[in-house]
Image (cartoon, rainbow, N blue to C red):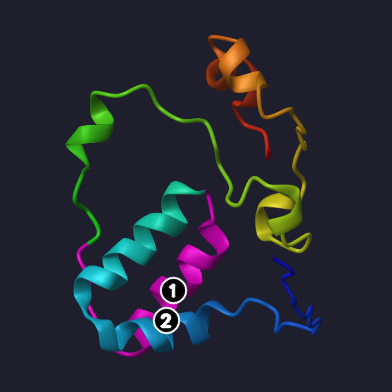
Amino acid sequence: MDLEFEITEKEAEEYNEKKVMENIISKGENVIKAHLEHLKSHGQFTWFNQALDFLKEKGIKIDISQENSFEDNQIKSEISNWPIQLHLINPLAPYFKNSDLLIAADCMAFSFANFHGKIISEKVI
């Protein structure tokens, strides 16, 4: 079976948190909270703060003070950024600013028992 496909390359717009929030607010409070938690849990504090500023400008109040009790009983992940695959990263992402970059093989996390605690803590991977 011969498969035919076409590859199209084009420039993508730079990530814009304000545009993301403009699209998200119509989806409701739960989606906004999920997005904010995603940014926060992946160390995207620049974009997280931009999102909060946007909500404030629009007069939208979202309670983000809920604690996730599930995480309290689990081993904490030290991953502070997303994505973690080289082909998906944005080299201009805020988490790269003044960071130590760690490039590790996929198998490393499975072969070293304390990979998160000893190796990737406080690093961009």
The disc placed on residue 51 is 1
The disc placed on residue 118 is none
Specify start and end residues of the magenta stretch as a single range.
43-63
- Asked whether the beta carbons under mark 2 and mark 1 sit within 8 Å of each other, the answer is yes
- Residue 62 as seen in the image, left or right of residue 113: left
Q: Quadrant of residue 36?
A: bottom left
> Does the stretch in magenta take in 52?
yes
> Does the stretch in magenta take in 64?
no
Decide which of 32, 8 is in the foreground and name it: 8
User: Is label 1 in a helix, a strand or a loop?
Assistant: helix
Q: Position of residue 114 (x, y in %)?
A: 54, 12
| Badge 2: residue crowd in 10 Å (few <14, some 14–19, many ≥20) | some
Tell us which disc is closer to us: 2 or 1.
2
User: Is label 2 in a helix, a strand or a loop?
Assistant: helix
Q: Please tell me which of labels 2 and 1 falls first in the chain.
A: 2
Q: Which residue is mark 2?
A: 21
Q: Position of residue 48 (x, y in %)?
A: 47, 64
- Residue 49 as seen in the image, left or right of residue 7: left
Instruction: Answer above or below: position of 107 versus 33.
Output: above
Q: Position of residue 29 (x, y in %)?
A: 21, 74
Outermost residue to the front: 1
Residue drawn at x 52%, y 49% as measured from the top left = 43
Instruction: Answer above or below: position of 2 versus 14.
Output: above
Q: Kindly identify the amino acid type of the residue bearing the numbered disc 1.
A: Ala
| Badge 1: residue crowd in 10 Å (few <14, some 14–19, many ≥20) | many
Inter-mark Cα distance, 2 to 1: 6 Å
- Residue 123 as seen in the image, left or right of residue 40: right
On-image quarter of the N terminus: bottom right
On-image quarter of the C terminus: top right
